[in-house]
Image: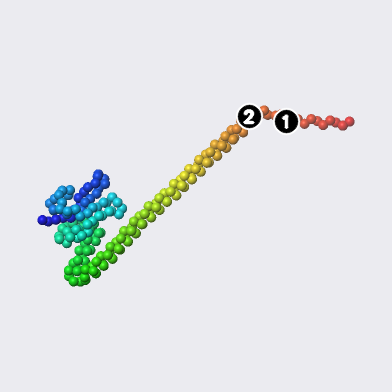
């Protein structure tokens, strides 16, 4: 029986969730499968993979052919590296302890890369939010300045109107002409 490691779709429309399964080559995508070895959630950042490493390694070493996406997932999880290291142990290039040491070094490096990518993404989001806030503050200040200018113009127009109204309502006072000074006799 030819086996394939493939994704089996689940989840709702627009929010896919996959099971990583071992299935017969002729079985349909969402049909019968032999064994479920993990899950894959591409909706998170970075994508979440929950994999039974030992079973995945067993199936890869026994000839199960993965689909392209599953191959990338297995490479990312280190299954193919461990298969390669087991090949080196079988050939006598190094022992099992050295293979495990090399795998742990790779795994540590991989975790550091993922953590730095997550931190960079988080920092970029914070910077974008801060920049957006600053731009919004500038826009709000410009609007506030425009409103203040408009209110000042309205207040000045109102003061002019009141001054004109006051000037119209007060009768014009006649200025008395100067009386001739009495002549001295």
- Figure check: 62 above or below 148: below
Q: Is residue 60 above or below residue 179?
A: below
Location of residue 183 in the rendering, given as x and y in whole percent from the top left corner: 85, 31
Which residue occupies 56% across, 37% down?
155
Which residue occupies 32% across, 61% down? 112
Label 2 sits on residue: 168
Q: Residues within 10 Å of mark 1 (few under 14, many from 20)?
A: few
**Residue 44: percent from the left, percent from the top?**
30, 51
Gap in Å between the C-alphas at discs 1 and 2? 17 Å
Image quadrant for the N terminus?
bottom left
Q: Nearer the viewer, residue 137 or 36?
A: 36
**Where is residue 94 shown, x and y percent of the image?**
21, 71
Q: Residue at x 46, y 45 (%)?
A: 139
Res 109 quadrant in image: bottom left
Q: Residue at x 20, y 71 (%)?
A: 93
User: Does residue 185 appear in this view?
Assistant: yes
Residue in the foreground of this view, choosing between 154 and 128: 128
């Amino acid at each position: 029986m030819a086996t394939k490691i493939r994704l089996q779709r689940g989840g709702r429309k627009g929010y896919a969730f996959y099971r990583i399964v071992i299935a017969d080559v002729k079985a349909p995508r969402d049909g019968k499968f032999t064994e479920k070895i993990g899950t894959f959630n591409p909706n998170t950042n970075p994508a979440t993979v929950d994999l039974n490493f030992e079973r995945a390694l067993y199936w890869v070493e026994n000839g199960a052919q993965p689909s392209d996406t599953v191959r990338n997932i297995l490479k990312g999880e280190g299954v193919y590296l461990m298969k390669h290291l087991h090949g080196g142990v079988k050939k006598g290039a190094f022992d099992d302890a050295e293979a495990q040491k090399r795998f742990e070094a790779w795994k540590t490096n991989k975790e550091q890369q993922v953590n730095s990518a997550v931190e960079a993404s988080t920092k970029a989001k914070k910077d974008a939010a801060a920049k957006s806030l600053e731009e919004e503050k500038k826009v709000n200040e410009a609007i506030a300045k425009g409103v203040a200018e408009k209110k000042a113009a309205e207040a000045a127009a109102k003061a002019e109107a009141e001054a004109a109204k006051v000037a119209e309502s007060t009768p014009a006072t006649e200025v008395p002409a100067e009386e001739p000074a009495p002549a001295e006799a």
